[in-house]
Amino acid sequence: MITRRQFVNRSLAVTTGVTLTGTIQASLKSKNLPVAVSTWDHGVPANKEAIKILLNGGTALDAVESGVRVPEADPDVMTVGYGSFPDRDGHITLDACIMDEKGNAGSVSFLQHIKHPVSVARKVMEDTPHVMLSGAGALKFALEKGFKKEELMTEKSTAAWKKWLVKSEYKPVINIENHDTISMLAVDKHGNLSGACTTSGMAFKMHGRVGDSPIIGAGLYCDNEVGGAAATGHGEYVMRTLGSFLVVELMRNGLSPMEACKEAVMRTVRTNKDLNRVQIGYIAVNKTGETAGFSLHEGFSFAHSDKEGTTLNKADSYLK
């Protein structure tokens, strides 16, 4: 837990230029760029696509969009895009957002029949005066932009839904593939940041439920002066603390990516008594490419990629 005194001292150090180990100031001369970081095991193939773009001189925005499109199109990743677990009524509804280095953002929520919601979110950002489109309006917009309407249910996801219907119990289990969002952050060779987040949300959720993933500041937040953060897990808990925005603001005030992720998790710990069925995790990257991941329960993994290659890392956690 970060005390008030520690927080104030770190903030003073930032404003006076004092070097702090592990903070943004201590890493100003880092040569780790470009870099990409994303959530869970399916972040590995996503990262490999993203870092390829970054190493070829592409932008962070192009990298994060292309990266998360990989699990969106993979029917074996049943929490993102095509082939996802449906809601309790048998409908796959998708949420996504994207944010660039200029603070522009776009998102879609409760979108059906479109395999790549993150790309629709980018179109919202670039081609409309809005940030979020939802439901039928988001689908109408996607079709007008040339996206193809598709059946997203597969034999595998249909079978999973029919099996769930036997008891129709909604009991999320931590780290079981029913809430594993793909969130990605990247810093390109020019030091510019972007992020993307895409998910089908909780398996067998109530029809109409929207989680944190399409909400700027909850599921994702980027500030090109500081860094970026993204969330995964039970979205309701992330929304209650605006966790990704919180992580970035903590980094702005001198905390390292790891310290900031830990403190964001602790906000949930301090305000909830029963944590047995709750999992949240955060990833973060600062302006110089230092990355971190931290979660409430153990079991959260995150992928890191730079010019040296891609690694899958076990995140530290509050509960062991």
Image (tube, rainbow, N blue to C red):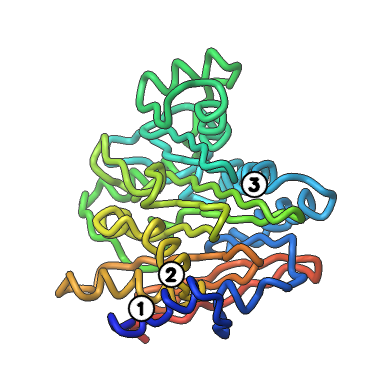
Kindly identify which residue carries mark 2: 253
Kindly identify which residue carries mark 3: 70
Q: Relative to 89, does residue 148 appear above or below in the rendering? A: above
Spot occupied by residue 67 in the image (x, y as percentages of width and height): 65, 48
82 and 51: which one is in front? 51
Q: Which amino acid is tagged 1?
A: Phe
Mark closer to the chain start, 2 or 3 = 3
Mark closer to the chain start, 2 or 1 = 1
Kindly identify which residue carries mark 1: 7
- In percent of the image, x 50 and y 77: which residue is there? 315
Q: Which amino acid is tagged 3?
A: Val
Q: Which amino acid is tagged 2?
A: Asn
Q: How many marks?
A: 3
Corner quadrant of residue 188: bottom right
Q: Residue furthest front?
A: 16
Structural distance between the alpha carbons of marks 2 and 1:
7 Å
